[in-house]
Image: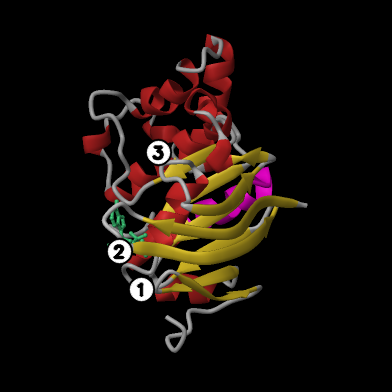
Amino acid sequence: MDLIRVRNVEKKYKNGVTAIYDLNLAIEKGSFVFVIGGSGSGKSTLIKMLYREEKPTKGQIIVGGLDVAKLKNKKVYKLRRKLGIVFQDYRLLPKLTVYENVAFALEVIGAKKDEIRVKVLKALEDVDLKNKVHNYPDQLSGGEQQRVAIARAIVNDPKLLLCDEPTGNLDPEKSMEIMKVLNDINKSRGTTIIMATHDKEIVNKMKKQVVTLKDGRLVNFKQKGTYDDEDV
Ligand code: ADP
């Protein structure tokens, strides 16, 4: 079954730049999909439209049965509860511990304390950081901070995890640790993962589905893809 359907989507920003042209895409539940392409090819714009940070100017986007562009602002929370988001720059709250950073996402939706504890510890176990629960972000390496951000994104067990250049600030070794964590989450929780990246080595190693964008257009969608320079 498809978790995501993108139909004839165009995104033209107010300044006149068209970031995405007539995009069609179907992504099955449980998939792991890389979105690749050069700088400015539209990767972030696509990710942003999936969580309704941006609206398409034409076409339709369905995520988990919700018509994303048509959602009223006060209903956007319904979409956001279905997904977690990881950014290149981690975006942790510096004055909260690792535990508190992850718990925060559940506190704001009114979860009970016991439930929060169980879910937070499970998420931190999944990213292999159970030994750092009481640390603050500035006491962690970049790779560890990103793993906290991943724990925060999955703590409520979303169907979809969106990652925008999650390894962009990390060296190759730490990047592969992040990829192992994401792969394990995809396998063990069945979370659908969409990851925008321009990291060729990662894409070629992981052998996942690959959506290639070039100048806002879909060039190809491969099942066990590689980063083909001639496409990008
Ligand atoms: P990528 O993530 O592949 O680098 P983006 O989606 O960020 O690509 O950008 C695609 C195109 O849209 C680029 O030409 C970029 O300058 C433009 N763009 C991105 N965000 C905005 C914005 N908020 N306003 C205007 N143009 C934008």
Of residues 131 and 67, the one nearer the viewer is 67
Where on the picture, by quarter, is residue 115? top right
151 in magenta:
no
* Residue 109 image offset from top left, x and y in percent: 51, 17
Q: Amino acid at mark 3?
A: Val
Label 1 residue near ligand 1, CB within 8 Å: yes
Where on the picture, by quarter, is residue 129? top left
Q: Which residue is mark 2?
A: 171
* Residue 185 image offset from top left, x and y in percent: 59, 47
* Residue 44 image offset from top left, x and y in percent: 39, 56
Label 3 residue near ligand 1, CB within 8 Å: no
Horizontal placement of 142 versus 20: left or right? left
Quadrant occupied by the C terminus? bottom left
188 in magenta:
yes
Horizontal placement of 37 versus 161: left or right? left
Q: Are marks 3 and 1 in contact (CB under 8 Å)?
A: no
- Where disc 1 sits, the SS reads loop
Please report the residue visible at 23 percent of the width from the left and 29 percent of the height from the top: 94
Of residues 171 and 15, the one nearer the viewer is 15
Q: Which residue is mark 1?
A: 38
* Residue 48 image offset from top left, x and y in percent: 43, 48
Mark closest to the chain's N terminus, 2 or 3: 3
Q: Amino acid at mark 2?
A: Asp
Q: Which residue is mark 3?
A: 148
- Where disc 2 sits, the SS reads loop
Label 3 to label 1, Cα distance in Å?
A: 28 Å
Please report the residue visible at 48 percent of the width from the left and 79 percent of the height from the top: 227
Q: Amino acid at mark 1?
A: Gly
Which residues lie in the magenta part? Answer: 179-191
- Where disc 3 sits, the SS reads helix
Res. 173 mark: none
Within-10-Å neighbours for mark 3: few <14, some 14–19, many 20+: many
